Amino acid sequence: MVGADTAWILVATALVLFMTLPGLALFYGGLVRSRNVLSVFMHCFSIACLMSILWLVAGYSIAFGDGNAYWGGLGKSFLNGVDADTLSGTIPEVLFFAFQMTFAIITPALIVGAYVERIGFGFVMIFSGLWMLLCYAPVAHWIWGGGLLAGAEWSLFENGVNDFAGGIVVHQTAGIAALILAAFLGPRKDKSKPPHNPGMVMIGAAMLWVGWFGFNGGSQLAADGGAAMALTVTHISAAAASLSWAAWEMIRHGKSSLVGLVTGTIAGLASITPASGSVSPVEALIIGLIAGVLCQELCGIVKNALKIDDTLDVFAVHGVGGMFGILMLVVFGHAGIVEQGGGLIVVGLFTAVMTTLIILVTKMIVPLRVDEEDELTGLDLTAHGERAYDMTS
């Protein structure tokens, strides 16, 4: 099965990169106003490039090197000691490096949705690079790299945290970071206009759905029945959450929107991510049906009760969805409450503190927010000197 495993993870790696480029870029780009769509594309593409380099330089080593309980060290920086013949399980380690690199790309890219339309490009780049190295990579080591929460000899919990594809490592960390960064930024000056291109949002969501088969199915790291089941339950949860979001929207507002339907898709995908290696199709159906309502309600709570302009609902959809999936593993008897709850608390506190420190340090280097005139003109023109659309035609 070595050849089959390698072939599948090659495909899965391409699928996960496809989630960011172009999936997430289109999903987020369609949700903002037309004068900011290119800035969203710029953020997603630039983050993908920067994270790729930083993952090679140090990120992979911090996450998956042979260090201690807290970090993997720098022994594998620049893929030191890794060549085409080095194995990680049944696949080439360089392929495992590439597969995990796509996770390191999409996680900081998810945060983009919280700060669109008002943030400085320089801040995005510095913050994202520091955050991936100092927050994401250590957490990946703790849970996936044999570290603090993995159930190894030095683990806090005997059995370790069950997080198959990133409910904590990806979605909780990105969601909490998004909420904190949005709070630091403050609200947009103009929040009155709806998404400029719902069709683009749907196309991006569809790409994310397809790419998620690699995200969850690939996390099995083998071409076997476990990967097939992960793919299947991923699809069921996404479909169920799409419909429950649309139904709840109909009950509350009298109409079901396209943007709402596909946002429900993403909520279902985020929620099934940590559980996709354990649950049955029926359990996935339940997770999706609840996620579509839960995440929709949290969108209103963040904006109305907390008064935080998390612009594209990163915390409510990704953060809450990922944490909900982690806890549903306890409900269905696939993990212990001590391990799952403890993992959420430890990572949540670490992410909050580390994100805050990185924001404060980055603010001393470059401005956090663009000035009011640039914000009202739009970041496409003021930050990048381009427009997505010919406004004269």
Image (spheres, rainbow, N blue to C red):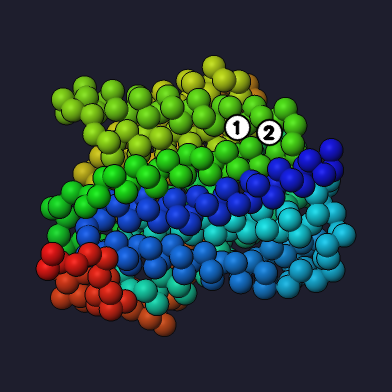
Residue found at the far bottom of this picture = 365
Position above or below: 4 against 243: below
Could you tell me the amino acid type at mark 1?
Answer: Leu
Query: Could you tell me which secondary element the residue under label 1 belongs to?
Result: helix
**Distance of mark 2 from mark 1, alpha carbons?**
6 Å
Q: Which residue is mark 2?
A: 227
View extreme (front): residue:
393
Foreground residue among 62 and 273? 273
Task: Tell me: 379 left or right of 49.
Answer: left
Q: Which mark is residue 393?
A: none
Q: Give the x, y percent position of residue 59.
A: 65, 66
Instruction: Please provide percent x and percent y for residue 246.
Output: 29, 27
Q: Position of residue 102 (x, y in %)?
A: 59, 56
Q: Quadrant of the C terminus?
A: bottom left
- Dot label at residue 231: 1
Left or right: where 259 falls relative to 178: left
Residues at discs 2 and 1 in contact (Cβ within 8 Å): yes
